């Protein structure tokens, strides 16, 4: 068995290397690349995708998986998990022709460039023909798989293994009335003052403050770095090279701080995976929802908590004395947790965030079912924003063009954000049981026990456990909305005196 | 034929894409990568090299080349050149086993890291075992090829197609006594004052000045960028993404300016190649010597010329008023052309530079012949520095550890620098015949006709012509030292009143 396992690991290691090389090219494309470099870069990424695919779906790998599966079946070992995840990915990949992968890489490279231009000019028509091609490809992609209950299941399963459209809908259906009711109650309460958050904050000082915070969290700079990019993201080149990006927004400067904590949350997950899993199918986080649970935990459950700011607010006030002049800790805490229907998903507060996701899920399902024409997207987007959040985007840049995902073909991705919110609080309840003094530790700026807990219970496992298995193992139940509703209700009842 | 040609181009395009992806990873390794990312990066580069090799040396490509060669033989077309260069590279590559390429990538990634550390600690013993492995690999590499007149020929041919060790030695033998004689005459003349060059110059202002200069030269920023790295270099990801790096040296601040012009010279060559050659075997410069002729032309024949500074000196003086207080244009011009035996090759003046190369050539030949033990390198280096230039490095960082090349296995590379100097002046004499007003144009800061000439006569051709063919086509003769000797003698006779 050892020989076969080593053979499989060597083959899959090469495939992983190509994927990681592509990630470097993708990172560079967004962080550094001069504008005219894009066409060749698209071609290079297409070639890498094609070769990774060719190298993965060989008969030899199929045989190795089949043989090893027999021998390892059912064992709770990393090796058995590697073979299980390899099999799952292999069976998917065999269905997708290499020529399709290459075409997709070219189409999405061009779509990304078009999206950048469309967003900067706030003109959806620039992006529209590219998105149409992207959706066409999505339809073809779905057609490679056996029809399930819903065509969207195929897409969802790529980001959240085992999750079904009907399950997500059920979770969202439970959640929606609770969130809507809460938002209504908040809307009729005394409003929170937050104007001081939108003064002019120096970009470099804000950036440095964010860097200090995530250093304290435990983001390991000897195995990472931070750069500027149009959209914040985390990307992994190995367990020892996990990078994040950030951006400064004139009209919402403090968003930089929270998105830095968010991306660091993703990065610490990746940095915490057992290094022996690197270059194997179980490296990296186990699913997008679990990944998002980590980023949202550091951004919201830590970064927007009162104890956190008990520690950091004096330093922030010292850094921005004029902006925060006369603003008490309590006022600041309320302001950064102000609930207000707003245009941009990534800047939405915890009480409204999931509604942004529900909107996108419905549009994506419409695109996948073919019941929605791409050209109508801006109008439908704006109508739904009005319906769900009571506001209408003044332009496409702050509406349908705000997110990078569709330009990369990542349809099926968005719901994992909302699921991640749920998982974050589900874990948080358990963590607070296991570490009763957690709030005191956070109040002292000490995150070591928290990070240790996450490493031990979540990070180190990589993809050894499937997401729902892991969530159940950690919290005692599969993904469920109740803890999140409890958390929101308690937090906002205090802030708004409900 | 068209179908076969398209097939070959498609296959070779993929190979080119992998090579370019590896270049992105290599650039990132030196410009951005966090320290601990190196091991995985070495692995990724090893995998890419291995796959590029596998994809290149297929029987299919061999057959396509063979068939197309028959049909295209002798034609002066880009297609015939593509097939000719492909054949040359193919025949070489078939001799080198993929496993060797992969091993080499891993060894050199580690050697690079060790070289970085060794240089920063000025401790050769850190680098020694890695260099020993590199040289071992070089011996194995040579053994894959039929024995030629000299084992070093195999290495030289990789960088300077068609060039033989005996030819380089002959050129250097003609050159050496002339340069030594000139240096001696200079040594016994009235010395030039240059202390003001070594004052403190602000890094950012210097960098900005360099950026202004190369923008004026015609470096196209929409198809490139500049970053900081430990060693300046140019790298090409496509004809539309040609990047350069720079560094600031405390003890020689203006070196930054000249190395920026140097790297921009390389980059403008790459940016000027016919875009239709991209992803084919004839993309990029035709050899290292011709490449170096371009970088040295912009750095020295333009950047250290009197007319150039007639234009730029007022701006430089305005940027650094205290450093250049009381320094006339003539004094500044003399200072930047001061001849003085010095330790660092990249900062050597034009009169001594080639002696640094001759030293390295002899050491490399010693390593290749096996007559020189790696552990003795620092001592031999220092002895030869004393013999050739009359000075001894005070430490290895400023001696044997100063260059990156050996850490990457690039043995056989150095002589192309000296050959490049010769080619630069050989072309320069022709350019001045074709553009009689060139000095007046440079005096006005106008480089457009010069760049146009280079594009038309050299850049656009890429690798369509072999280096010696191109040099002969452009100047009427193969590489020859006479023009360089004429240039040095005239320039330094004026400066030193010989």
Image: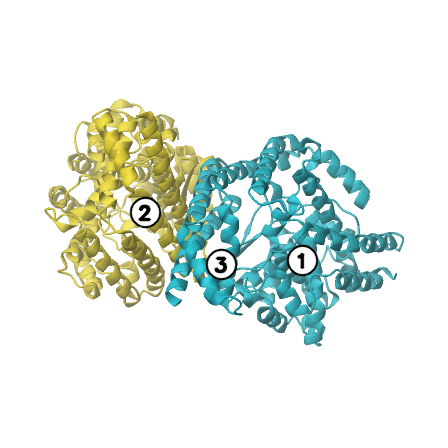
Chain colours: A yellow, B cyan
Measured from the top left, where is residue B72 in percent x and y?
Answer: 48, 67
For disc 2, the marked residue is: A54
The quadrant where residue A44 appears: bottom left
Q: Is residue B319 above or below residue B195?
A: below
Packing grade of label 2 (10 A; few <14, some 14-19, many >=20) is: some
Measured from the top left, where is residue A151 in percent x and y?
Answer: 14, 50
Question: What kind of element bears circle 3?
Answer: loop
Say which chain tag 1 marks. B
Taking A56 as reference, is B450 left or right?
right
Measured from the top left, where is residue B227 in percent x and y?
Answer: 54, 52
Packing grade of label 3 (10 A; few <14, some 14-19, many >=20) is: many
Say which chain tag 3 marks. B
Please name whichever residue, A36 or A377, is drawn nearer the observer in this view of the structure: A36
Distance from disc 3 to disc 2, alpha carbons, whole Å, reads 24 Å
Taking B249 as reference, is A98 left or right?
left
Distance from disc 2 to disc 1, alpha carbons, whole Å, reads 42 Å
Please name whichever residue, A474 or A107, is drawn nearer the observer in this view of the structure: A107
Taking A201 as reference, is B425 left or right?
right
- Mark 3 and 1 residues: CB-CB less than 8 Å, in contact? no
**Image quadrant in which the C terminus of chain B is located:** bottom right
Q: Is residue B148 above or below residue A368?
A: above
Say which chain tag 2 marks. A
Q: Which mark is residue B281?
A: 3
Q: Nearer the viewer, mark 3 or mark 1?
A: 3
Distance from disc 3 to disc 1, alpha carbons, whole Å, reads 22 Å
Measured from the top left, where is residue B122 in percent x and y?
Answer: 66, 34
**Res. A185 visible in picture:** yes
For disc 1, the marked residue is: B420
Q: Nearer the viewer, mark 2 or mark 1?
A: 2
């Amino acid at each position: 068995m050892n020989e076969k396992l080593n053979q499989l690991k060597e083959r899959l290691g090469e495939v992983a290397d190509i994927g990681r090389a592509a990630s470097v090219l993708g990172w560079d494309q967004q962080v550094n690349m001069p504008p005219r470099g894009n066409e060749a870069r698209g071609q290079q990424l297409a070639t890498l995708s094609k070769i990774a695919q060719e190298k993965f779906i060989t008969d030899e790998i199929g045989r190795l998986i089949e043989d090893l599966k027999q021998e390892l079946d059912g064992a709770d070992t990393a090796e058995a998990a590697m073979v299980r995840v390899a099999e799952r990915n292999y069976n998917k990949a065999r269905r997708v022709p290499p020529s399709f992968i290459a075409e997709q890489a070219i189409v999405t490279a061009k779509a990304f460039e078009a999206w950048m231009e469309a967003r900067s000019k706030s003109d959806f028509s620039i992006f529209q023909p590219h998105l149409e091609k992207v959706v066409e490809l999505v339809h073809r992609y779905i057609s490679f798989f056996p029809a399930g209950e819903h065509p969207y299941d195929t897409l969802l399963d790529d980001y959240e293994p085992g999750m079904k459209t009907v399950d997500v809908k059920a979770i969202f259906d439970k959640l929606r009335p609770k969130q809507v009711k809460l938002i209504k109650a908040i809307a009729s309460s005394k409003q929170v003052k937050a104007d001081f958050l939108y003064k002019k904050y120096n970009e470099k000082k804000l950036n440095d403050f964010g860097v200090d915070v995530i250093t304290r969290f435990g983001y390991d700079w000897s195995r990472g770095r931070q750069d500027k990019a149009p959209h914040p993201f985390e990307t992994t080149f190995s367990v020892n090279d996990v990078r994040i990006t950030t951006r400064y927004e004139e009209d919402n400067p403090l968003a930089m701080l929270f998105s830095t904590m968010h991306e660091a949350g993703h990065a610490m997950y990746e940095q915490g995976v057992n290094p022996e899993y690197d270059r194997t199918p179980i490296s990296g986080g186990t699913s997008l929802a679990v990944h998002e649970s980590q980023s949202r935990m550091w951004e919201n459950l830590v970064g927007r908590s009162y104890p956190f700011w008990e520690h950091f607010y004096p330093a922030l006030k010292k850094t921005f004395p004029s902006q925060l002049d006369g603003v008490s800790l309590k006022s600041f805490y309320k302001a950064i947790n102000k609930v207000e229907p707003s245009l941009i998903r990534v800047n939405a507060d915890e009480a409204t965030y999931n509604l942004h996701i529900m909107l996108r899920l419905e549009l994506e399902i419409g695109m996948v079912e073919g019941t929605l024409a791409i050209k109508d997207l801006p109008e439908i987007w704006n109508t739904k924003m009005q319906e769900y959040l009571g506001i209408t985007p003044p332009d496409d840049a702050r509406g349908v063009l705000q997110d990078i995902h569709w330009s990369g073909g990542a349809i099926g991705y968005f719901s994992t954000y909302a699921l991640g919110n749920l998982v974050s609080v589900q874990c948080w309840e358990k963590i607070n049981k296991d570490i009763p003094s957690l709030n005191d530790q956070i109040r002292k700026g000490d995150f070591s026990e928290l990070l240790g807990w996450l490493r031990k219970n979540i990070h180190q496992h990589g993809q050894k456990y499937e997401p729902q298995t892991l969530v159940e193992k950690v919290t005692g139940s599969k993904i469920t909305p109740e803890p999140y509703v409890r958390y929101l209700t308690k937090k906002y009842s205090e802030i708004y005196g409900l």
